[in-house]
Amino acid sequence: MIKPWYNAAKDNLRPVQPARGTHTEFSSENVKNGRGAPRTMAGSAGCMCAVRALSVCLLAAAQAYLLFVASSRSDTVRFGEARYEPKHSQMMLPQLPMLSEGRFSRAGAWQTRLVLPGRKRGLRGRNGEGTAVLTVALISNNREASLRRLCDSLLAADYSSLGRFFDRVDIIFNLEASSDDGIVAYARGFHWPHGAKLVRKRAMQGGLILAVSESWFPSSPEDYGCLLEDDIEVSPHYFQFTSEIMLALQREPDPRVIGISLYSPRRTETTNPTKAFDSSALISELMGPGYRESPYMMQTPCSWGAVYFPNHWEEFVKYLQLRFDLMGTGAGSPHDVQIPRSRTNGWSGSWKKFHFELLYLKGQYLVYPNFEGQHSLSTNHMEKGEHIKAGDVAHKRQDFTVPLLANGAALTMLRSLNVSQLPVLNLFGEPWLREAQLEEKLRRAATDASLSNDRPRHQQPSLLAVGEELVTGDKLVSATSGGRGKQGSRSVEVYYAMVQNDGQFVIYRDAIMKGGVVSSPAQPVWSTKTLYDEVEGIGYRLSLVPTGSLKLEQVGATNGEVLGMLWFSPPDPIARPAGTGSYLAQLESDGNLAVYWANPCLTLVWEVGTAGRARRRGDPSMLSVGEELWNVPGDRLISLDDDNLKNGEMYHAAVQGDGNFVVYDRSKRDADSMPTAVWSTNTHTESSGSVGYRMVLSSTGSLRLEQMSKSSGEVLDLMWSSPSDPDTRRPGTGTYHAQLESDGNLAVYWADPCLALVWQSIRNKPHASRCRRRRCDRAEVSDHASCSQFPTAVPSLLQDASTFTLLISTHSRFELLSRQLSYYSASPVISTIVVTWHHMTIQPPPNAQIRGTLIRFESPSSDSLNNRFQPLLHITTAAVLVLDDDIKLHLQDVHNMFLAWKENKRNLVGVSPRWVDAQATPAFASRATAPQDLVYGYRSEDDTANPHEGYSLMLTRAMMMHRDYLRLYTCGGTSEGLNLTVSNRFDQLRSLILSIVEAEFNCEDIGMNFIVNAAMDTALSHGQQAAPLFVRPLHKIGDFGKMGHTGLHQKKSHVATRSDCVNQMNRALWRVTGRNLPVQTKLVDTVANRQNKSLAALSVRQYYGLTSRLHKDCFATVYDGTSDEACSWRVPRRIDYAGTYFTTKLCGNMSHCGV
């Protein structure tokens, strides 16, 4: 199947046939007429002046004609018509070249060239002639002998195919400033019989990057550039090969093809070190022996003879300009583009470095020749120049100089070439998968995943949640090494815990690696001491139960039946309010196994750690409820600045052996060079060897300094306490913590998660309301790596508005994923699908291509739902559609969502709205006097009896948004694409959302709604529309979420968790914007045309209640029957959908509207 945007690409490739006489060459030695028959003109100065005057008149007339044509017709295609814009839209309007002056022919006469646009007549003109132009750009740096050899090979080539695609071949000599008079004289005297000739010489030495990038610029959409450096030699069949490939692309367009390489490489350029590359052997392996000499595609720009297409080269020049205009282009620059694993990241003086970047970002490639023995259409003679120095031993001639193709009979097979069947290689020479290969890879992954999916999913390597299990052989891995670890040379100590087949659960300290060498073997550090004999058919299982207790059981290996309890940890002694949080067990970076109550801040329930006292963990400036400070060396609080960065550790506070708790200023010293005490509890007592002292934070928000018996651990006396919280706090909605601040102030806060001051040591110190950052996470949430490396200016240049990128996150639904990829790749408006692969032990497949759609797989280093919104650099479309891996949305509804989004780019456009209720009142306004307590409505339909006034959330089941929101969610900053500038307090909300999502493994879609509402608040007056915008689908949505037991929504605490998320985020939103979660009171209705169901009318109207069920539960992945469209993955017969968008409703209840 050829996509509609392939047809558009076909139009882009079709040469334009000028009307007879509109292409005119005026020269003292050559005037081209028709197919190029020469006609001699007088060379007098007066005649030349007349010619110049006539040329200027013709040029002015042509410009006036173009203005008339442009004003009388539109070259853009609206979605309201039954056509599509090209998938990679570049308007193919004719461009007039600059009228050239000061050009001299070989005889020294004035030469003027004028090209006027003609009418499009398809591949052939009236006389069966092709009309495209091939401009051969020669790049010379003072090597006359090399230049002569290249020109001789060009003259000796076969141009008998002129007229089939190319009408003529022009030639440009680009001479460096260093070129001597002999080279200039040779270029001037060179006779070129196949088209126009131009000689250019630089005034200043420019270097190879400028020499190449400025050697040619397309004068029209039909001007193709063949770039040749002077140490290149071409085969006699280079032009015939180029013509045949162009005609093949004419028959079967591929918009990702941006050029044709004439050279067949023998080594890879991007691998480190470079590797031998045998294209014939590889293609034979991929396609079969019968295709051994078939061309192939590769994501590698060629500098040793290549033809580049006009639209792409124009974009590449813009990309170069952007990179040069930025502050730096080298590695480490904030604008540098890093290609994973690529050797090109370290290049500095090569134009190909930037070309590699562009091809990588856009998923583009060149067509490469592939003849036996790597015979090529061009070769490099490896002569001394800018990159090849005298005595260079790294570049061996046998690796780069290839034989030229001498037998033209090998080109006959190109007459029947099927472009869509050609394999695509990435920039490392590795093949992209085809649909059948990808389906097989995913089938195998599904088989592997099913072995672990037979029991509740263990989601993160260091964590065990309620309902999850570890069985015999399973491991927990300490938090610092979770996920896909990165290899390095520094020493790393790792802990892991596993259920053994001898009935024990054991924690091990893993080998310490120093420079890749094992310096010590793994050692056990703790175990349940439940040793049993290994018995066939008997297994063991560790689980976390709803009381907060870890339980080790003996089970039947085949049926999972519990045979006995071997060990358990104490349950939580405190009764926790139902639905306000959850328990989790974590193997921490120091090997401690701990159970916490998370709501989302962590409260310790039980731990393996040091007997007799609880340990502090995390932020060294904080003390939380359940943690303790003792009068032992090293146990202290250390001040941090407001950004959680060490401020020289200016202040520290410690419990002393004399019963005092003291805050010291380390920047001030007394006469004995001791730090100066700035505050203390003034509880000095005589030291005693039988007693100790500890500072704890009670559940009422009071700091307590207690005297303890060292032998029994009993509390002997209360030495000092701070006041308890005077306000009554609702249980489960927040936690207390004490913090030593950057100015030495010791303060106690209630965090819900925003901070409310309870007590402080510095009286009357002012405090601004703020939300605590990165404290309610299971582990600290740092900004994504892409945030510091993201060149924000690059995406603004590479912005395709005619298509969008589909984002799918998956963990183990690989069979469903296979169906999704096959189905959505058929959509004409989806150019790229990015799959975020969350499975930590099964590796994702390589990139693939289905029906022209590029499938990219991203493997984050940790299994976090925050990874759904990574601001990936290779998302080059303005719109992204985030889709759950268990949802099937009809392709027409996908198209309609895109149409609605193009008119509402600041909104989250989707098909799955959700409602929230205020506990105090049945309805609420977005602005009130205080943040409200909200209840998440877990239902897909509104209340029939009492429908809401609107909806407040849009789920990521299918949510379309501007790509700038990905960066706002992950990194903060601004949105240039939407002209949104967020407030300084925006990061407080963002950090909270990242922490909650990390802690709960839930609520990322809710978080995105709050992010967008906060961002829109800066641009919209209060009371205007909220973030979500519902588009009513024309077709039922297929929901495969009830298959198996891997869905997050199947957890018992799912609804309570999401209500808690809504409330925490709403309180933070209130502090940032001064308003509650707003309500959207509009929707977009859709109606299909009665005569043509592929056409639709979209109309904005008031929300009227969503009471009909929009989705259907599906229970089989392989279902291609026509009786149940919602659950069928069969691609519709017609996919050329179109629609018209109206800002007001068309008529009545839309039931009788026509399009």
Image (tube, rainbow, N blue to C red):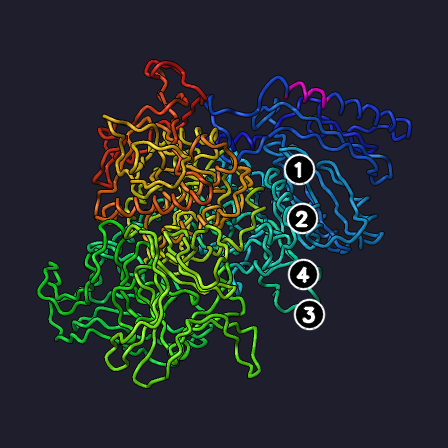
Residue at the disc numbered 2: 325
Q: CA distance from mark 4 to mark 3?
A: 12 Å
Q: Main secondary structure of the magenta part?
A: helix
Q: Is residue 382 left or right of residue 861?
A: right
Q: Secondary structure at mark 3?
A: loop
Residue placed farthest to the left in the image?
Answer: 563
Residue at the disc numbered 1: 218
Q: Residue at x 59, y 57 (%)?
A: 402
Can I make out residue 734 in this image?
Answer: yes
Q: CA distance from mark 2 to mark 4?
A: 24 Å
Count of numbered labels shown in the rendering: 4
Q: CA distance from mark 1 to mark 4?
A: 27 Å
What is the span of residues highlighted in magenta in the rendered image? 62-70
- Please tell me whether mark 2 or mark 4 is closer to you in this view: 2
The amino acid pointed to by label 4 is: His
**Circle number at residue 387:** 4
Query: Considering depth in this image, is 767 or 535 the residue closer to the camera?
Result: 767
The amino acid pointed to by label 2 is: Asp
Residue at the disc numbered 3: 391
Q: Residue at x 80, y 55 (%)?
A: 178
Q: Is label 2 in contact with label 4 (beta carbons under 8 Å)? A: no
Q: Is residue 371 magenta?
A: no
The amino acid pointed to by label 3 is: Gly
Q: Secondary structure at mark 1?
A: loop
Horizontal and vertical percent position of residue 18: 66, 25
Residue placed farthest to the bottom in the image?
Answer: 689
In the depicted structure, whether residue 1091 falls above or below residue 607: above
